[in-house]
Amino acid sequence: MAQKQDINFVKAVIIGEANGKTSLCDSLVGLPYSEHDSTIGCYSKHYSLSNGPYSYDFHVWDVSSSVLIDDIHVGVMPMRLRHSNIIIISYDSSILGIHEQIHSALEFSKPLVNPEKSCFIFVGTKLDIKPSSVDNSSEIAELCSKFSAKSIEISTKDQINLIELRTIIIESCATLFSHEIHHSLVVEDSKSCIIL
Ligand SMILES: Nc1nc2c(ncn2[C@@H]2O[C@H](COP(=O)(O)OP(=O)(O)OP(=O)(O)O)[C@@H](O)[C@H]2O)c(=O)[nH]1
Ligand SMILES: [Mg+2]
C-alpha cells in the first residue's frame, strides 16, 4: 500500500481580465460565491488537498486585472508568475471570441513559463449566462493544442463544473509531479493573505 508522502507545494496563479478571477479563487478554496470589489494587487488564498497518499499545499494567487494594463503592475508580473506550477487564464465564456480576451495574459505569461514545470489551464467563467449562440470551442481547442493546455467552462455563481475544475488542476499537478490520481480528493484547510 502507498505510504503518506511529503506535502507538495503548488503555486497556482489566476490571471486575466476582470471576468471572475476572485470568485474562481474563492470557490477553489471552498468559500461561497459573493460580490467583490475589484482586486488591488494580489491575494494568495491557500488550501490543502489530499489525493490518496499525496498531499498538496495549494497557494492560489488571485492577481488583479490591472496587471495587464497598469505599468506598475506589469513590472511585477514576472514575480507573480515566478515558480508557478499552474497558470489559470480566465476568460468570460459568455462573450464570443477568446483570443482578444486572453491575449495580454498569454503575452505576459508565455515567456515566463517553463513547460516542464508548469502548465496552462484556460477557464471560461459565467457559464450560467452564456447564450446558446456563443461557441468558443474551436478557438479554445486551438489554444489548448498550441500550449498543451486544458480548458473548462464554469460558473461559480451556479456551482457548475467546479469539481471538474478541481479535478483538472489535480490531474495537472499529478502529471507535473509524476503522481497517480486517486479519486478521494479532500479539501482539508483554507486561509488567505495579501501579497502587495
Ligand atoms: N453570472 C455570473 N457572474 C459572475 C460569475 N463570477 C463572477 N461574476 C461576475 O463578475 C464580477 C467580477 O467578478 P470578480 O470575481 O470580482 O472578477 P475579477 O476577475 O476578480 O475582477 P478584478 O479583481 O477587477 O480583476 C462579479 O461582480 C460578478 O458580477 C459567475 O459565475 N456568473
Ligand atoms: Mg478580483
Image (cartoon, rainbow, N blue to C red):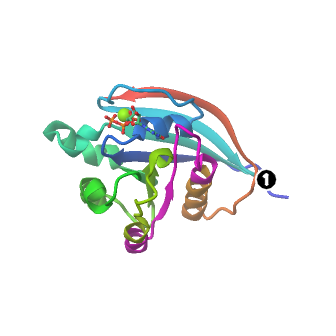
The residue at 25%/55% (across/down) is 108
Q: Residue at x 58, y 46 (%)?
A: 160
Q: Secondary structure at mark 1?
A: loop
Please tell me which residue lies in front, 74 or 7: 74
How busy is the neighbourhood of tag 1: few (under 14 within 10 Å), some, or many (20 plus)?
few
Q: Residue at x 27, y 48 (%)?
A: 78
- Looking at this view, name the residue that lies furthest to the right: 1
Residue 39: % across, % down: 33, 30
Q: Residue 35: image x %, image y %?
A: 43, 26
Image-quarter location of ligand 2: top left
Could you tell whether 163 is left or right of 128 in the image?
A: right
- Above-or-below relation of 41 to 55: above
The residue range painted magenta reads 141-165
Q: Amino acid at mark 1?
A: Gln
Residue 7 falls in image quadrant: top right
Q: Is residue 67 magenta?
A: no
Q: Residue at x 64, y 32 (%)?
A: 189
Q: Residue 63: where, in percent of width, then height? A: 34, 39
Quadrant containing the N terminus is: bottom right
Q: Is residue 100 left or right of residue 160?
A: left
- Could you say where residue 148 lies in the image, as x and y percent from the top left? 44, 70
Return the residue at label 1. 3
Front position in the image: 105 or 141: 141
